[in-house]
Image (cartoon, rainbow, N blue to C red):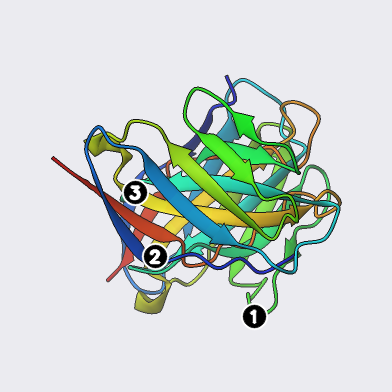
Amino acid sequence: DAKTTQPPSMDCAEGRAANLPCNHSTISGNEYVYWYRQIHSQGPQYIIHGLKNNETNEMASLIITEDRKSSTLILPHATLRDTAVYYCIALKTDSWGKFQFGAGTQVVVTP
Amino acid sequence: GAVVSQHPSWVICKSGTSVKIECRSLDFQATTMFWYRQFPKQSLMLMATSNEGSKATYEQGVEKDKFLINHASLTLSTLTVTSAHPEDSSFYICSASGPYGSYNEQFFGPGTRLTVL
């Protein structure tokens, strides 16, 4: 599975949109991009995933560049409860769900 | 839907004892379960893959005789830390896949914090 690179940390003001970048320049055609987040001392929570089209759900939007080498997770209106470590993971369809977590981005939402 | 539970949520034990952690998929049958370990301020590290009715597959560097995994049913996997030592103190997290027929749809449990004295 392709390696992903994320900034180690970022701050975001409450109520504003949070844009979390992820670089996956070596991603292959059969690899999905998954986003999970982990609030302190809890298990990871699924946010969204996509292959090449942009995706949106009730939690977030996922924007994948046309060349698929990078993506951005957008939290449209950040709240204090969105403070967490966000993980971007590239996973092949035949990986049988074996996620390899990187360091992620620590997002701190401030009032 | 797709809820995964873990029991206990935390446990303290003496060095040399064994500890069993349960992972249950509450509202779906999990064809595969995974076990992760997370040390403070570090990311999750995959320990093993557990398939119902077969032996677990361990990641490189994980001692299979120390971390015993049993996946006896489609809703239960257990991790037993045998002869625990202080260096085994960690946050253990399980995940389960298969609720919607996709192995890549994983749902995580809340984690179990193990402290070995």
Farthest residue to the left: give it: A111
- Mark 2 Cα shell of 10 Å, populated few (<14), some (14-19), many (≥20): some
**3D distance between C-alphas at marks 2 and 3:** 19 Å
Please, which residue is most extreme toward the front here?
A66
Q: Choose mark 3 or mark 1, whichever is in front.
A: 3
Q: Is residue B27 above or below residue A37?
A: above
Q: Position of residue A94 (x, y in %)?
A: 86, 52
Mark nearer the N terminus (2 vs 1): 1
Chain ID at mark 1: B
Q: Which mark is residue B61?
A: 1
Determine whether, in the image, residue B38 is placed left or right of residue A9: right
| Residue designated by label 2 | B90
| Vertical comparison of A22 with B73: above or below | below
Which residue occupies the foreground of this view, B33 or A38?
A38
Residue B2 horizontal/vertical position (percent)? 59, 25
| Drawn side of residue B83 relative to residue A82, left or right | right
Tell me the quarter of the image containing the N terminus of chain B: top right
Residue A84, labelled with which disc? 3
| Same-chain status of marks 3 and 1 | no
Q: Label 2 marks which chain's residue? A: B
* Secondary element at tag 3: strand
Percent coordinates x, y for residue B19 in the rendering:
45, 58
The residue shown at (37%, 45%) is: A42
Q: Secondary structure at mark 1?
A: loop
Please, which chain is the residue tagged with disc 3 on? A
Q: Residues within 10 Å of mark 3 (few under 14, many from 20)?
A: many
**Residue A33 visible (yes or no):** yes
CA–CA distance between discs 2 and 1? 16 Å
Could you tell me residue B94's position as x and y percent?
A: 55, 48
